[in-house]
Image (cartoon, coloured by chain):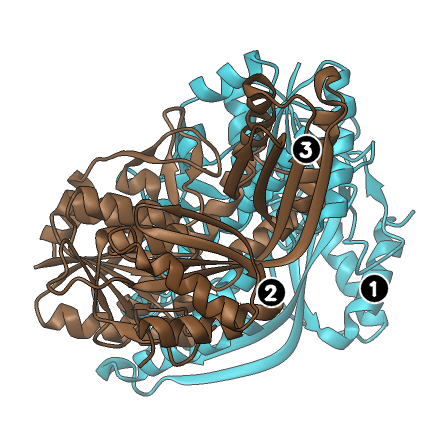
Chain colours: A brown, B cyan
Amino acid sequence: MIRVEKYGGSSVATIEKINLIASSIKTRVQMGYKIVVVTSAMGKTTNQLVEQAKQINPKISGRELDALLATGEEQAAAILTMALNNIGVDAISLNAYQAKIYASNEYQNGFIKSIDFKTIIKHLKDNKVIVLTGFQGIARDKSLVTLGRGGSDTTAVALAVGLKCPCYIYSDVDGVYTIDPRLYPSARHLKEVSYDEMIELASSGSEVFVTRAALLAKYYQVPTILLESMKEGGTNLVNELLEKREISGISVKSNLVYIKIIVSDLDERKLGIIFDLINKCGLLIGMVFYDKNSNLIAFTINKNDELKFDEIILDLKNNQELKSINVNKEYCYDKLTIVGHGINQYPGIISKIYTVLASEKIIIYQMTSNEMSISLLINKKDLSKTLELLVKTFELGR
Amino acid sequence: MIRVEKYGGSSVATIEKINLIASSIKTRVQMGYKIVVVTSAMGKTTNQLVEQAKQINPKISGRELDALLATGEEQAAAILTMALNNIGVDAISLNAYQAKIYASNEYQNGFIKSIDFKTIIKHLKDNKVIVLTGFQGIARDKSLVTLGRGGSDTTAVALAVGLKCPCYIYSDVDGVYTIDPRLYPSARHLKEVSYDEMIELASSGSEVFVTRAALLAKYYQVPTILLESMKEGGTNLVNELLEKREISGISVKSNLVYIKIIVSDLDERKLGIIFDLINKCGLLIGMVFYDKNSNLIAFTINKNDELKFDEIILDLKNNQELKSINVNKEYCYDKLTIVGHGINQYPGIISKIYTVLASEKIIIYQMTSNEMSISLLINKKDLSKTLELLVKTFELGR
């Protein structure tokens, strides 16, 4: 009985927490499990390392940043292994070189290309708990590459794919709720969500599991369980829900800036130039809307990407064809994404949303929709009221 | 013109210092040098990591401690490389996996077995500055192994051996003085010391360069220069001094505990048991003295090894043959080692020392001597007075 267990940064933030996790792993070892642990860096380590690097260069990126960031997981893996050894559990830490995790050479955003499982399987046969550094891989030229946001989740699922075993994702939340309980404390806990719901929730802002890992879990049908460290229960990812529900939950992305760009004679070529530049700068945009007749492009960016965005605008204005570009920024928006298999099968849902929000004079500034979700852009001040109304309407509370 | 440059922890303690070092490296790159930099961990990082590990287990040692400690140099190498890239110097960081530095699998105390220079030479040909993690190697099973005290010095000299180039050891002291200037500010700076003098000074307490690196430098005749970061000058290690001097300098080891062990019917077998245990526990002892007739063994230990020593005593007392063992500890001793090629060629030196110290009523508690040095154990309170007298007698001041 092999299992992969992944621990997030807040679960391993202190030596005390690490000791507790070690004890809980020990009980499962005694039950006969063979365990591959994937750990994130302790607490805010990764952020601290980024801050240090930014002292050298505020726009730092590339190979050396990854060489620096990868050390966070290496420290956590070594310390958790010490804690296991210390209570008599035979354990060994493996970094990406040792575990032979190969990645593409896209720094800060690598993807796992392959894992050579020989070393891992050898140690499992020797009844060792393996503590593996998440978030890192080795490029062909032996450079360290980090795997981007949620990289450790991805490492964990990729290991479970190869080991054909379940994947337990431990964090400080006991799985998926209809709404992030930090935003809406009486949200309902979900014992099961489908892979598709999870992908949709994750890509629209839920932080309990990351989209790419959910995609991987779905593709390889990895039994995945999201749960709170040291606790039972959690949320199982499943293929099909026994009982389909219209709405599975609501994700929230806060602190968005709503951008409107107006360019005279906006056409596909100009559009291409603009999005090409946005893409090259790695800016994440959402709720994209384009209307040819009104010469308008609209989208949201994260507030902390604003400086990056301003540079793009400067570049655009230097372009002869785009110098008449007009940019409008509006602040204090939150995006609310309502996710559910039923959304586009039951056309009544959109009208229900409009009706109930209109009745309380909540303004929807933009709306986009796809097969499984509807996103609304609302004013920050309306967030809690809106959540409350939607919870009541779609019975998402406890 | 290749050169190896090694920077100690205090030289890279802050981002400001790292930026300064990067600029100074840049000037040498512009002069046409090809540079391999070896860096220690930033400031007190290694100590902080050890403290963290000790929270898990105060007696922590072994594989996982090295997996943890090695991250300190990896961080420093990445950050220094960022600083170089940031001012337009093409640089790349290499860890032990990338630079292929292979070590014995003695954790916390590995020695370098071999370096595969292909990667290093390739990057030098591409005119890249290489920033290499000191203090670490890879064992045959791919585990990380740290190289023990002064490990980064050893990495640097080993690289210079393979690259057949000079080795510059940068620290916060501009080379070798007749006495550590922190202890005796008007000590005289030495522009040259012989490899043998350096080995003797280092093994008796001088911290500017480590014994094993000095041994390596001597064996392979590596031109080695010890100097202060950002400065010219320093001390050259040479084979033969043009002008031989009787005394080259004085090393000081502080905070020693003087141990006397009395065992009834002390013989070689009992002696064997005692030293075997001391050796197994990795306790470093000095000034060893054994007298069969008085059933006495005497030696010094470092004050911070006292707990380790007490455990050894407990073990000894559990031994049937040694249970009558009697241990006496005396505190507050400093050891002073007078180093020089001339010491045993000029028998007058020892009598000079005794005479001058006796004239000021300074008590010498023990004395040991070898081919190139004389060590004196004195009371801590007499240290500065003793240094002053010896400086005057042997003309070691400025």
Label number found at residue A380: 2
The chain that hosts pointer 2 is A
Kindly report the distance in space between the C-alpha atoms of the residues bearing marks 1 and 2: 83 Å
User: Disc 3 marks which residue?
Assistant: A262
Kind of residue sitting beneath label 1 = Val
Query: Does A165 sit left or right of B307 as displayed?
Result: left
The chain that hosts pointer 1 is B
Whether residues under marks 1 and 2 lie with C-beta atoms below 8 angstroms apart, the answer is no
Q: For the residue labelled by badge 3, is the local secondary structure a helix, a strand or a loop?
A: strand
How many C-alpha atoms fall within 10 Å of the one at disc 2: few (<14), some, or many (≥20)?
Answer: some
Residue B137 lies, in percent from the top left, at 41, 39
Vertical placement of residue A180 versus A223, above or below: below
> Which image quarter is the N terminus of chain A in?
bottom left
User: Disc 1 marks which residue?
Assistant: B356
Residue at 27% from the left image edge and 44% from the top image edge = A215
The chain that hosts pointer 3 is A
Whether residues under marks 3 and 1 lie with C-beta atoms below 8 angstroms apart, the answer is no
